[in-house]
Image: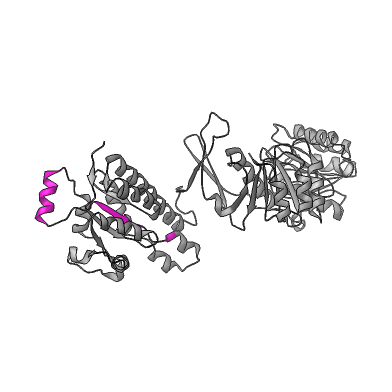
Amino acid sequence: MTATKKIKSALISVFHKDGLDDIVAQLDRLGVTIYSTGGTQSFIEGLGVKVQSVESLTSYPSILGGRVKTLHPKIFGGILGRRDDEDHRKQMSEYEIPEIDLIIVDLYPFEDTVASGASHADIIEKVDIGGISLIRAAAKNYKDVVIVPSKDQYAQLHDVLVNKKGETTTEDRKSFATAAFAVSSGYDAAIFNYFNSDDTFPAFRKAVNESKPLRYGENPHQKGTFFGKFEELFEQLHGKEISYNNLLDIDAAVALIAEFKETTVAILKHNNACGLASRDQLSEAWKEALAGDPVSAFGGIIITNKQVTAEVAGEINKIFFEVIIAPGYDQEALDILQQKKNRIILIQKPSSLNTYNSRTLLNGVLVQEKDQKTESREGLTTVTSKTPSEKEIEDLLFANKIVKHSKSNAIVLAKNKQLIGSGIGQTSRVDALKQAIAKAQAFEFDIEEAVLASDAFFPFADSVEIAAESGISSVIQPGGSVRDKDSVDFCDAHNMSMVFSGTRHFKH
């Protein structure tokens, strides 16, 4: 597996020219014969480097508006011909097919064109044919050919040209081929997903070429990698390397804070809110969010939808936390927050996220649309004799946003747009409610006139019975149980109001 081959000839045909000048200079220095096409040929000639046109090799012009340039036996024969096969060598000699040792190519920017909002016709023109064919052919014949499928591999090629004098081992060529198949498969996945945007074809394709090795996974004995473009969503201003568990919390935090328009602070632990409040002033939102559960806040992550001021940073700095996320920070606030060297400080950039969730399990993948339903007062149905007050409706909607992002079975108690207690991840709804009440009482909240949100219906009246005993005045739940009437009747008998949202918000 260590057969060494020297690069003597190269075919270059790229869309992006940045970084190519240095590569061409190194090839010229080594005396490599260069073949090229169209704009790339003009670029190389502009560098003062000798280059042969593909047309002079194939004796055939670029046709059909450039759709057919390199698709020719003299090109693909030069790439696919096996150097150790006597029959191949005889045919290449007979048909005057030169050996091509290096392919430098990239693909039309299909995904960028789609993202730009271009017309369907323009998008179709960015479906690369010649480039993808060159990549696959060269990667298939990696034992003889070096394939550079994008500018991301220029650094690796530069090392070969400068430090190895243009000589590659089989391991080198296989490494380039691996990158090539990653590029080609990702490109095909993007095209498929564009054509299948309405999900008419039952297939799942997801390709991510960007990756970041993590220190470890959920636990130190597990390996972990993040595949994605984290920097598109966040700018990290300070702190240690982001971990697997940090990423899970960050994802949960971003989804939760998106529910709130007014000034809001949320504190999360293990993907669930342990503190959250909405107020006119950020300082008050922070104070009330922390009061929701100051014990669980230890080692959690903080997110807000407003720029962090020095005043608020000074208060936040009093507790230990892993991550803070905000749309911006005053310089003085940054100076305060950066006092802890490991503290991760992120700016959340304006961006759009995927509209679906996927997770691996068993021997396959589950895919679903994200839960993007957020209840409004117009969608609520009062099912009790007593109608909730305006203040209660405001708190019910507030609590429902939180319970939507809490692990099932989930119950959330809220009062004055403050999370005062939650029960999450329980195997029974009664246990979830008891946990929520116990937490609220532990931090000395007055539960009288608080509201309750449930992520799913009540199968029995036992939950509202417990709620009534604690002084809870109003309840929001999706409804839909065959025994809904039991809960409604109990509320009517105990001067409680209840509304149905009509939407279940399970989160497992």
Q: Indicate whether 35 appears above or below 397.
A: below
Reply yes or no: does residue 31 show up in magenta.
no
- Residue, far top: 221
Q: Position of residue 42 (x, y in %)?
A: 30, 69
Quadrant where the C terminus sits is top right
- In the image, 489: left or right of 74? right
Which residues are drawn in magenta? Answer: 82-110
* Residue at 32 percent of width and 46 percent of height: 163
Q: Nearer the viewer, residue 28 or 209?
A: 28
Where residue 271 sits, quadrant-wise, is top right
Query: Residue 372 location, x and y as percent?
Result: 64, 52
Please report the residue visible at 68 percent of the width from the left and 56 percent of the height from the top.
328
Q: Is residue 89 magenta?
A: yes
* Residue 86 visible, this orientation: yes
195 over 422 or under it: above or below: below
Q: Quadrant of residue 451?
A: top right
Point 84% across, 48% down: residue: 384
Coloring scheme used: one colour
Could you say which is closer to the camera, residue 163 or residue 202? 163
- Front-most of residues 13 and 21: 21
| Residue 374 in picture, x, y percent from top left | 70, 53
Picture quarter containing residue 38? bottom left
Q: Position of residue 204 (x, y in %)?
A: 46, 47
Which residue is at the far bottom? 65
Can residue 420 be seen in the rendering of this structure? no
Q: Is residue 342 left or right of residue 24?
A: right
Give the quadrant of the N terminus.
Answer: top left
